[in-house]
Image (spheres, grey):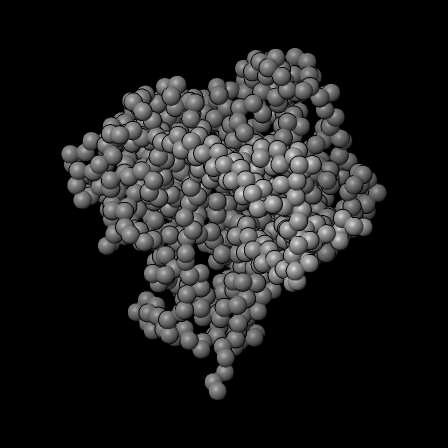
Amino acid sequence: MSVLRSRFVQAVVILVGAFLALRFGIRPPAPWSVIQIYMAVVFLAVLIFVSSDTDSWRSFVNPMRAALVDPSQRPVRIVLAVALPILLGYYAYTQAAARPQAPAELRAVHPAPPGSIQFRGKEINIAGVDNPLRKDVATFKRNVAAGGEIYVRSCMFCHGDNLDGHGLFASALNPPPANFEDPGTIAMLQESYLFWRIAKGGPGLPRESTPWNSAMPAWEDRLTEEQIWQVIAYLYDATGQEPRRWETAH
Amino acid sequence: MRAIVLVGALASAVFLFASASPAGAQAGDAQAGRAVYERKCALCHGEKGDGKGPGADLLDPRPRDFTTGIYKIRTTVNKTPTDRDLFDVITRGMPGTFMPAWDVLPEKDRWNLVAYLKAFAADKFKEAPKKQELPKEVASSPESIRRGKEMYEAIECNKCHGAEGRADGPSRPELKDEWGHPIRPANLTKRWTFRGGGGRAEIAMRLTTGVLGTPMPSFIDSVEKPDDIWHLANYLASLGPESPHYATLLTAEAVNGDIPADPVAEFWKRMAPQNIPLVGQVTIDPRNFNPSIDMVALRAAWNDKEVAFHVTWDDPTQSGADAAKKASPDVVSLQFPQKVAEGADRPYFLMGGDADAVYLLRWENGKGATEASANGPTRIVPLAGGEVTGQAAYANGQYRLVLKRPLVSKGPDRPTFQPAVFLPIAFQAWDGGAGETGAKMSLTSWYYLRLEEPQSSRRFVVPPVVAILTFAAMLLVVRVANRRA
């Protein structure tokens, strides 16, 4: 297999193989920008590989030089002279005719919570607080059921019966309603964090979380302190998630 | 006592149907289904299956009352649905309603639910389901669609669904379901909200079996020939797309010359609509859990002087303000920040807040186009001396509206529209005929609008230049290489 022994062919095979592996071997597909960076690294590595000694470098460069000067390679030259300008011209067209995309919304999804909040004129601690309803095991189930009733009358419209953020009203909202089944939401938050988010809603978010975009109402206007703790208990019970614990003091 | 009755009912149901399951269906375990039901379904459908769960009274259409054994979506001649029918409804949900697709549940759970649902009305399931066969399928074609339209009028679909299918027929106000609740006819131009699915075969099946518990009857005996069911289905499928393809970025097209003020002008028809979903306002009172207007379609254009917005939306009733009848007008409004701020800051999406006002381009039936500034839904202040003009047309359950404004604003209360800038935009709509007014509306959160710069000729100039330069560079390389060789 003399063809495969040529450094040029080897370099091409490595580059093509690396591209195919990056483009089709990764699930979910990697973004183009990432593939570009990886391909640049592979290309550099290939250059180092082919230039490791003089023979190797010659074996790499010779086919290219032959394509440029060798009289017998004239057809290759003609094909390249037609194909390369067309390819680059097409690329230039896709760039010049591209339509702009909506700018990315940079937004802190889970901003740092305040130490305490004012809830209907009462100060409620957020830091270090767990759901007070969990203390009474006997009534906890009843509180979960009450939370379910609150959920279906208040939250379900956007967050959905499945608690997956796909309520009927979700389609018009950006940012989309939180998906409680996702391990990246309530499972990584303390219960009092949820209390803050439910009580103060979108308008209570800090600036870096774009409070003007969020359609989450401030539920302190409609729900009592106990009702909010009930609906929090329901969220964890219905999804089977565990609330994050506060780190114990050192 | 109740438990004993239930267990008895379950036992008889399981006994009756375990043997009669059609192909593909699995016999479910009603007792196992009960556990799933109580966790996933009871909050709306009620623990007793009577459709009176804690969330039920806010929903329209209301959750199904399983104790009646009446099911909308079936593929049977008689009133008994097959297990597969029930399974499919659970799996796909009821599009356009708060019943979601439960395909997140394991298939086994869904078959168990089917068994449990049947136990709520075991006597209704004593009669075995008789499969409805459809006439031989007729492919869609212009002739078939024409024939379907004839049938549509002949069998009086338009009485409820309206002349063009937008649910605006004259019988609309009188329609009641089996339980006496008012019911809205389907908007036939929005197939993605069809409860039993928007495919041609599914439509043909609904036409054949009817929709039980609603005023929609079976039409298989009303049409002239059985084939007409397919012609009708083909016609209905031609009324609108199967999916709304909601837009994410809204654009206004650059045009040379005048932009027509007439909303029915040909100019607007050749522009593709950008569909935007609207949902009920449920943040402040009065909340709107069952909004009437669920979508607007935007077309927009601008020239060197002005920007024009063409808005299309379906509203089954044309209503204006009438103090004597306490009637509210139909209104639509486009919302922008008063100033285009640096960075991401913008006013609160729900018509602004105390400190940050929004600018509204409003159109009201009977009053026309106005400009306003708002600090929330209840604090709307008209802006004087505006230059906004509006022209609307209403026909067959649909509004079409053109709002025009000069690009450059006249004062600090109004934004200036600049090309190639991402401008926040949001929408609100009120169906006065459905009692929507004030905070009771449907709305969107912020979108981006961009006035596209004219498609420059750059895209035709740059590529040939690149190609020629590449060719020249190659010639040079070959030259140099030959000289060296």
Q: Quadrant of the N terminus of chain B?
A: bottom right
**What residue is shown at x 63% (from left), y 30% (from top)?**
B199
Q: Which of B477 and B64 is in front in this view?
A: B477
x%, y% of residue B389? Answer: 24, 28
- Residue B193 seen from this side: no
**What residue is shown at x 54% (from left), y 70% (from top)?**
A243
Q: Which of B182 and A164 is in front in this view?
A: A164
Outermost residue toward the right in this view: B19
x%, y% of residue B327? Answer: 31, 32
Q: Is residue A191 left or right of residue B437?
A: right
Q: In this view, does B385 lie to the left or right of A183?
A: left
**What residue is shown at x 37% (from left), y 52% (from top)?**
A213
- Position of B150 relative to A149 (above/below): above
- Position of A100 relative to B315 (above/below): below
- Residue B107 seen from this side: yes
Label tally? 0
Outermost residue toward the bottom in this view: A250
Q: Quadrant of the C terminus of chain B?
A: top right
**What residue is shown at x 63% (from left), y 60% (from top)?**
A51
- Position of B335 relative to A58 (above/below): above
Q: Nearer the viewer, residue B359 or B453?
A: B453
Q: Nearer the viewer, residue B170 or B374?
A: B374
Which quarter of the figure has residue A227? bottom left
- Position of B292 relative to A52 (above/below): above
x%, y% of residue B364? Answer: 29, 31
Q: In this view, does A249 lie to the left or right of A87?
A: left
Which quarter of the figure has residue B270? top left
x%, y% of residue B422? Answer: 35, 44
